Amino acid sequence: MARGDETTAAEIAPCKAATPTKNPWTKRLPQGWWLKRHEETLAAPGREESQIAFIGDSITDGWDQKGSGLEVWEKEFVPMKALNLGINCDSTQHVLWRLDHGAIDGLPNLKVAVVMIGVNNKGITRDKPADIAAGIEAVCKRIKSKAPQAKILLLGVFPRFFGKDNNEDVNETIAKLDDGERIFYLNINQKLLDTEGAIRDRVGHLSAKGYEVWAEAIGSSIDKLMATTPEAKGAKDAKGAKNADRRPPGGDGSMFYRVFVSRNDRNADGVVEKDEFRGSGDRFDQMDKNDNGKLDRAEIAELHRSRMADPLSMRQRIERGETRRPPIDLRPVPADGGDGGDPSPGENGDEPTALTPLGTRITAKQAFARLDVDANGKVTVAEFRRSPGMADLKKSQEVVAKVDQDGDGELSFGEFNRVFATRHRAAAPDPPS
């Protein structure tokens, strides 16, 4: 299949793998579970702001799982407004069904779709390699049609049986889908195989280490694709590409820069202006070495170097007053110091307080301020997940949805206070020693 051919393999030889399934439920899942999971992705808070979508099966779904990819996901991809569209047991035909039923509809800001699908086409639906390749091509074609503004980072199908089946019979074909314009192919299989313990089982599920390898392996590709989408490229051209393209002097710091910019640079020009900065004005002024009202890549790199030169723990930074946003414990401390009872009194004697990891008591307003990272008066699901016991995305979404009275997918202080007050009725742990 030569690059630029107008007729695709899926059109030449239609097959089961390249045709949306008629019944999305699979025999390996409880009836109704699959459709419910699909509906959850459609209702994910903040999904309309997503800039990256990961599309795939249970291996992709593992990004949201504690003990698998969750820690890396929260660190690397939540700040980049990523959406996880992986579902357990999916083959290409299931992904096609989901794409036809709204999976990436209503995502105007989508810049990159990361696709890794095909493992279950061999292990469950028993499709032929050529048919699997045709199915993957059909998935890419559907994404191009549904999200014409987005680039596709197409990953080679991950290894099965710890590399005994490296899926080369499929990957050699789908590699030819790389057209250098909309579809970009990348095979990270060898990196996974070379990292001890990265692959957890014969199916190809990954360990936490495996997800670290995955994130690192695609990081530079995502950077390039995010920077070459039409709106991002236009912003750079308008304000000059020098700052956006210049690498930080000294140590690498590329991941630090990427996360920092994704959280602050609203117009995607590679610099952070004061009105874009999500921290305090005083902190911005400290970082703005040349007093031009902007943080360019060199100044952000300087922040990274200072952090590397002074690698304090979060606790030490809190004690030194360098940060005001540690993860907090919203569970109450009983007034009698025991295992239950009424919440501790606040400064006014009637306002309940909670315990932080440092053993200090804070009010609901203080807890809200610490979770409200961008200080915009709203707590998103991503911010709320910093609370103990709320790392699981599904659980956080359920709690937020339950008290989100205005339906905007975020918590105002009034809405958050309902959660805070409810948790004060639960038993609390002993204070840290």
Image (cartoon, rainbow, N blue to C red):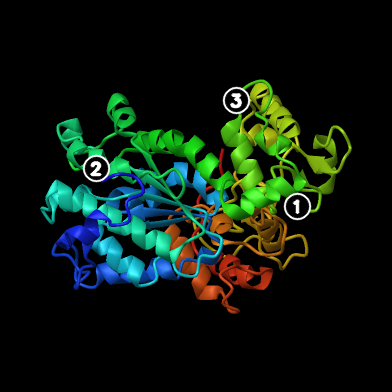
- Residue type at numbered disc 1: Glu
Residues packed near mark 1 inside 10 Å, few (<14), some (14 to 19) or many (20 plus) = some
State how far apart marks 1 and 3 are (Cα). Answer: 24 Å
Tag count: 3
**Amino acid type at mark 2:** Thr
**Residue that carries the numbered disc 3 in the rendered image:** 252
Residue 355 falls left or right of residue 120: right
Q: CA distance from mark 1 to mark 2?
A: 44 Å
Q: Nearer the viewer, residue 216 or 173?
A: 173
Give me the disc on residue 173: 2
Give the residue at mark 1: 276
Answer with mark 1 or mark 2, whichever residue precedes in sequence.
Answer: 2
- Residue located 59% across and 47% down the image: 327
Q: Secondary structure at mark 2?
A: helix
Residue 169 vs residue 375, the one in the foreground: 169
> Is residue 316 at least partly visible in the picture?
yes
Q: Earlier in the sequence, mark 1 or mark 3?
A: 3
- Tell me if residue 37 can be seen: no
Mark 2 closeness class: few <14, some 14–19, many ≥20 residues within 10 Å: some
Question: Residue 306's x, y, as percent?
Answer: 71, 26
Residue 200, given in percent of the width and then of the height, sits at: 25, 37
